Image (cartoon, rainbow, N blue to C red):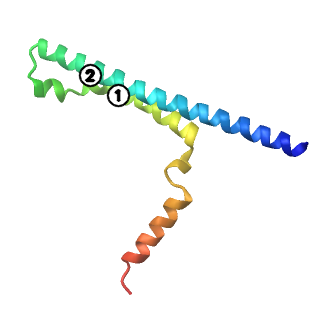
């Protein structure tokens, strides 16, 4: 009986985590699509205002939304995956093996 409750809690917790991950990926897709669209509009607006394509394409102001919204995406990723997403035990072990193999005896 107690075993079933524990399994049920684990299942519910896993289900909630999968939902968070699913929402994150949806948010990431929306981020990319909307920012590509807006950047295209900003660049075409700059070209209509007299800038060359290179000037418009390299204009920092056309990419500010990528940066600020991207900061939110990073915090959301850290909230969902944690820092172990980047530096987990597998990563440590791979790096140790890599450096051991590079060393000359």
Task: Calculate the distance from the C-alpha at mark 2 to the C-alpha at mark 1.
Answer: 9 Å
Is the N terminus in the top left, top right, bottom left or bottom right quadrant?
top right
Residue 88 seen in this snapshot: yes
Helix, strand or loop under label 2: helix
On residue 66, the disc is 1
User: Quick check: marks 2 and 1 in contact, CB under 8 Å?
Assistant: yes
In this orientation, which residue lies closer to the viewer: 3 or 20? 3
First reached walking from the N terminus: tag 2 or tag 1:
2
Quadrant position of residue 35: top left
- Identify which residue is drawn at 55% across, 50% down: 84
- Identify which residue is drawn at 82% across, 43% down: 6
Label 1 CA crowd tier, 10 Å (few <14, some 14–19, many 20+): some
Q: Position of residue 10 (x, y in %)?
A: 74, 41
Is the C terminus in the top left, top right, bottom left or bottom right quadrant?
bottom left
Residue placed under numbered mark 2 in the picture: 39
- Above or below, 35 against 103 in this view is above
| Numbered marks: total | 2
Helix, strand or loop under label 1: helix
- Identify which residue is drawn at 36% across, 83% down: 104
Q: Position of residue 90 (x, y in %)?
A: 52, 60
């Amino acid at each position: 009986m107690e075993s079933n409750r524990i399994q049920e809690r684990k299942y519910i917790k896993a289900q909630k985590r999968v939902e968070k991950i699913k929402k994150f990926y949806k948010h990431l897709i929306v981020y990319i699509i909307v920012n590509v669209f807006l950047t295209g509009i900003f660049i075409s607006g700059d070209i209509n205002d007299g800038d060359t394509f290179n000037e418009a394409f390299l204009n920092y102001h056309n990419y500010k939304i990528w940066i600020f919204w991207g900061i939110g995406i990073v915090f959301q990723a850290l909230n969902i995956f944690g820092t172990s997403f980047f530096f987990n035990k597998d990563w440590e072990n791979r790096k140790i093996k890599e450096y051991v193999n590079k060393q000359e005896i």
